[in-house]
Amino acid sequence: MIQLEAITKSYQRKLVLDDVSLQLAEGQIYGLLGPNGAGKTTLIRILNQMIIPDAGQVYFQNKPMQAQHLQHIGYLPEERGLYKNMSVAEQLLFLARIRGLSKIDAQQNVQKWLVHFDIESWQNKRISTLSKGMAQKVQFIAALVHEPSLLILDEPLSGFDPMNVELIMNEIKSLKAKGCTILLSTHNMKSVDEICDAATLLHEGKVLAQDSIWNLRNQSAQAEIEVRFKGHMLAFANALWTDFELVQQTELQEGYFDCLLRIRGERTVNDLMRSLQDQVAVERIEKRLPSMQEVFIDLISKKQTSHD
Amino acid sequence: MTKFWLITLRECKERLQQRGFWWMLILGPVVVLLLLWLLLFAADQGKEKVKVLIADPGQIMGHVVMAQQEKYVEYYFLDAYLEIEEFKKAKAYQDFDVLLELNEKVLNNKKCFVFYRDQLSLDTRMQLKFEVERRLEEILAQQFSRLSMQAFRSIKQGLIFDFRDLADPKNESKDTSSWVGFGFGAFLLLFVGIYGMTIFRATVKEKSNRIVEVLLASVKPQELMLGKIAGVAIVALLQLIGWILVLSLGFWILKQYVVIDFLDPAYWQDANSMRSNPLSKFIFEELRIGFVLLHFLLFFLASFFFYGAIFSVLGSRSSADSDGQQFLIPLLLVIIMGLVAGVFYILYPAAALSKVLSYLPFTSPVIALIQLAQGPSLAVYMQLVLSWVLLVILSFALLWLAGRWYKKTILKF
């Protein structure tokens, strides 16, 4: 769907993006992650052709991206704004037309989305009279009123109450089901865990990690193993040797334990099972993948430690 | 419809929906009319006696002036030519306030010159003109016509009184037409200044509420900037047209009802007296109003885009209204400089600096409107066309440059 090749951008000699490449497949929800100042917004602005990269190329549907492709892109920026004196319908109509829809199509789409979000009664209200949450909803509609094939959402959940977070999450899933490709830039890692198919983690303008969400979580050194066994704790600890680190232990009742282990080196769950089979009676063993939050913190911390 | 027009129309609609626009449309001209009425009222107050010396070498008037009820003007006669310098400096004439010069050809060319030491009130001018004109009519009627006085007055041609300041007998600085042109220029700069500020504020607002990020994902920064300037320009034009209409209506009402005292023909018992107001005579008879308005419109649009580009860039550099104040003050001073240049041109039209100022884009619109009101010669008109072309070229260049700056700065929060 969209491909970025070796994008580099500097502002006043400060390198903001350094040789960043990524590829979004059609119908995918792609997470763009990174701490503040990592270069996410610059990358998004390059995708929206607001900024021209110093080097690199953006491809849209395998063709070098041009201005006419912008009408197929919807964008919800992190810093949002609407014209306060305009009514909801006027605002949406204006933004739909700016995105290239004809007047009739724009009117039809505005009505459709207002009905879809059950907010037809707001259409004549001025933006200045809406609450922050209501305005956020209007902004979300504004990003997809022209039915784009690529939707770029920068922190789409910020400012919403839990009910509306659920609503927006479901809407994003529903858009994906309809074939819309979504680039999601967020600090809300729970949403990344829940809806993203793949992600790129940016740090100081460079790609720190890039893979499917499953691989990112699975490959993380943060992977832990939960074990429930019957036997002696001492025998269990001896069996771990130096290959696994005992992080936590809980005695459920006499002779029954729940333990949390961290893998060292290249060891696997099978290695652990082999070590334990003659020492204790294993009742349950499960590899617990780290959340994206943990993966994120782990990767960034490691990077910062290596800097130090 | 192009994105440019969508932005332009949105800007227009937003401004037209604001109450301030409609208040300004009514209140602005009303305040102008009120000030004008106050000026007329003040000019009519504190009448003092004025001594008029009529230099009448041909003794046309025969030392006689129409009798009058209120003697605010006293007449004295001199049966010889009198040089202006002599009247100005000689001790014998220091008691006289006004010198009315009647040469022997006055009955044919219908023109006489009136030199005054201090500015005369409109009322005094009217009285002087009325009384001298009536006397000359009598003489004309007796000498050249067998018609009765009443029949003669119905077909007669009015006498032209050219009032001039003794300090400026060639009337270089106090020419009514120049000041009317200056008024048009001031009007132009006033609207450019007010609506330039609107462009500045609208840009800052879009930037500070961050909608600019959504807009720039669909339109080019230059397109956004141009659309905004064009939208505000249309609103400014509508406001301007509204002002012209309301002011015209106001002038008509003033003439008909408010200042009827001295404008009403019945008051002076002379149907032609109303035309003798030099300002109204100039506006309604000598000034080609359509011609000036057309050029006013051309210069207004060119200078609006010129200044609009600057205001846009300043807006794009500021995150809040207060940020831009430091840049706005020098810009407003430049606009005021346009007015100063206009005064300079009226006072010293032949100076080399006047020539330069008439081409500078900051000052050329005011000077051009002065020249247009004066009734330009072909050479002056060609120079005026050149200054407009220069202004348009510079406006385009500035818009192009401003577009680049705007693009660089608008996304810096």
Image: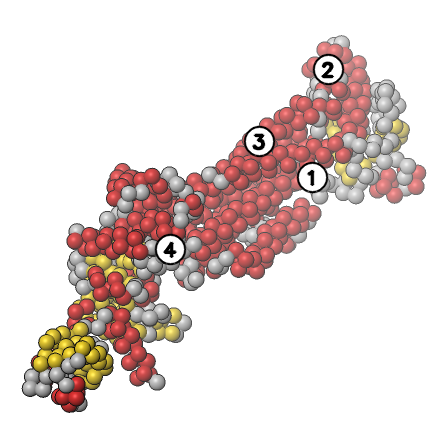
Percent x, y for residue A225? Answer: 17, 77
**Same chain for the residues at labels 2 and 4, yes or no?**
no
The number of callouts visible is 4
The crowd level at tag 1 (other Cα within 10 Å; few <14, some 14-19, many 20+) is some
Residue plotted at (16% across, 72% down): A215
Residue A59 in view, yes or no: no
Say if mark 2 contacts mark 4, CB within 8 Å: no
The crowd level at tag 3 (other Cα within 10 Å; few <14, some 14-19, many 20+) is some
Q: Secondary structure at mark 1?
A: loop
Q: Could you tell me which chain the residue with mark 2 belongs to?
A: B
Indicate which disc residue B153 carries: 2
Residue plotted at (55% across, 31% down): B245
Q: Is residue A154 left or right of residue B15?
A: left
Say if mark 1 contacts mark 4, CB within 8 Å: no
Residue A79 in view, yes or no: yes
Label 2 – label 4 distance at C-alpha: 76 Å
Residue plotted at (74% across, 25% down): B262
Percent x, y for residue A182? Answer: 23, 58
Q: Give the mark nearer the N terminus: 1 vs 3.
A: 1
**Same chain for the residues at labels 3 and 2, yes or no?**
yes
Q: Residue furthest right?
A: B92
Label 3 – label 2 distance at C-alpha: 35 Å
Indicate which disc residue B246 carries: 3
Mark 1 lies on residue: B175
Say if mark 3 contacts mark 2, CB within 8 Å: no
> Mark 3: which amino acid?
Val
Nearer the camera: disc 2 or disc 4 = 4
Indicate which disc residue B316 carries: none
**Splitting the image into 4 quarters, where does residue A306 fall?**
bottom left
Indicate which disc residue A80 carries: 4
